Amino acid sequence: MSSAPPDLLPELVDLPGRRRLRFAPSPTGDLHIGNVRTALLSYCLAGEDGRFLVRIEDTDRERYQPEAVPRYLETLAWLGLHWDEGPDIGGPCGPYVESERLPYFQAAAERLVESRAAYPCFCTRERLDELRAAQRAAGLPTRYDGHCRNLTPEEVSARLERGEPSVVRLWIPPGETRWDDLVLGPQLFDNDSVDDQVLLKSDGFPTYHLAQVVDDHLMGITEVVRAVEWLPSTPKHLITYAGLGWQPPQFAHVALVLGPDHSKLSKRHGAQTVSEFRAMGYLPEALVNFLAFLGWSPGTEEEIFTLSELRRRMSFDRLQSSPAILDQQRLDYLNGVWIRKIPVEELAQRIQPFLPQANQEQLLPIAAMVQERIRRLDQVPGLLAFAFSEPAPDADFLRGKLTREEARAFLERVPELLGGDPAQLMDRLRGLAQQIGGGDPATEKKFIQAAMRVLRVATTGAEVTPPLPESIALIGNEAAARRVQRATRVLAEAG
RNA sequence: GCCCGCAUCGUCUAGCGGUUAGGACACCACUCUUUCAAGGUGGUAACCGGGGUUCGACUCCCCGUGCGGGUACCA
């Protein structure tokens, strides 16, 4: 018998989607890469005929940051993880913000108390702290001692009326709790090792434990994908489901993402939020591809996947149970692959934020010349610094392996070759270098290479740049000629 | 302290009782080339330790060790 109004805890109706998986972040800052990975897995595992939903878990009023919600949604959208139901678009199970669903949680808590699956608790924080300290000192596990389990209904209502602050605790029955985890296999917990968890806080808000159970049920979630850090609280959730008379979803506990030193990814490991990776010039395609392989693999030797391929291919039985270390070198490699994979027009647009000084007409040729040689978008400014500022190499740097005289003799005649068909520019330059080099076939090739380096340094101030003709085209023949003349002068003066 | 999870090259991983333990990143050579990339070719590199089970263990079981997680009116 339940005293909760039936409409507050509706029975499940038919909901869309064969599988229904959710991502339920707590909006407390920036979206962490580990969270995003579980979101990605949930999105993919839902499959093409499933639904992916987003629910905001804002039950902690102290850590809650309202401005984080739109940021999270924007990040998910940037990654391409589109949700079928969520706080902004609604859906059949709305609202999708837990703080707007308080009546459901309170009704569930009431129902649990009614059936003695849970009980009101009036213990103060001081008492609880002392209790735990004493247990620890005695080498015992730290757990609530059931002090308020058997208060009489009369005493409870008297204290409630007096306005004593109280919480609702889950009553863990004796016995054991088992389930078959989709990643870890059969799990068994002795209920003696499970604490009487607080379900409803004294401020009337549910804890994560209650909110998660109630909402996952009400939203028809079929599989819960979460990090192993939740493993020890799964028995509490299962017991709560049982107390409510509900069938629990299946659980898939995936391993954590660790930093290079094998500890939980944190600030000291550098980038850890999606925004940070984004600012470094990683493509969402690459991030998705990379993250998917942290804990999943197709079992073949394929390694480049689009999001939709991942969604088609991913299955629970190929999830990995061991933790993975975030290897940025591999991310860089994959990012390079994806940079080369997208159309150059697309790349031009994505480069734009990293090169605000470039105008629209410059963007496309720039994209074409950097596409093959960057692994991150934020490398573009460095590679193209010469296009936006005048280089000033000194004589020794200029000449490289040539003598000053050779270098000067070569550069002196370059300006006259700059005009004419750009496609033939390299031929003309090679011919000139050949002349200056004296035509010894044994050393000719090396001489030409050294001469080209001189010209590269003269026009760009750097040894590593996009191909010469393109670099010259980018700054224009006039500027190139001016730079070459300046370099010739520097060489002459030094000599 | 107590409870729990994990364990193949440095890293991501394949393997699911019998394999020359495969691929990828990184690294090192060579190659292509006007530089750098990209590409191509080749190379170095791994089953945490100890017991079982078995004709046979990287694969299954137990113990240890290591690493990680949980132990809140945070998620």
Image (cartoon, coloured by chain):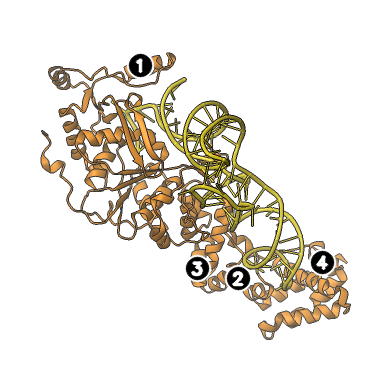
Q: Chain of mark 3?
A: A
Viewer-side residue, A419 vs A370: A370
Viewer-side residue, A347 vs A329: A329
Q: For residue A62, what is the image quadrant? A: top left
On screen, residue B18 above or below A391? above
Q: Which residue is mark 4?
A: A399
Q: Chain coloured yellow: which letter?
A: B
Q: Are marks 4 and 3 in contact (CB under 8 Å)?
A: no
What residue do we see at 10% from left, 33% from top?
A1
Calculate the distance from the C-alpha at mark 3 to the C-alpha at mark 2. 14 Å
On screen, residue B49 above or below A382? above
Residue A103 drawn at (x, y percent): 18, 39
- Point out the tag, 4 or 2, that comes first from the N-terminus: 2
Q: For residue A204, what is the image quadrant? A: top left
- Point out the tag, 4 or 3, that comes first from the N-terminus: 3
Residue A356 visible? The answer is no
Of the residues shown, which amino acid type is indicated by label 4?
Arg
Q: Which residue is mark 2?
A: A369
Q: Is residue A230 left or right of residue A394?
A: left
| Badge 4 element | helix
Residue A140 visible? The answer is yes
Calculate the distance from the C-alpha at mark 1 to the C-alpha at mark 2. 67 Å
| Badge 3 element | loop
- Point out the tag, 1 or 2, that comes first from the N-terminus: 1
Quadrant showing the C terminus of chain A:
bottom right
Of the residues shown, which amino acid type is indicated by label 1?
Leu
Q: Chain of mark 4?
A: A
What residue do we see at 55% from left, 67% from top?
A340
Residue B59 drawn at (x, y percent): 51, 42
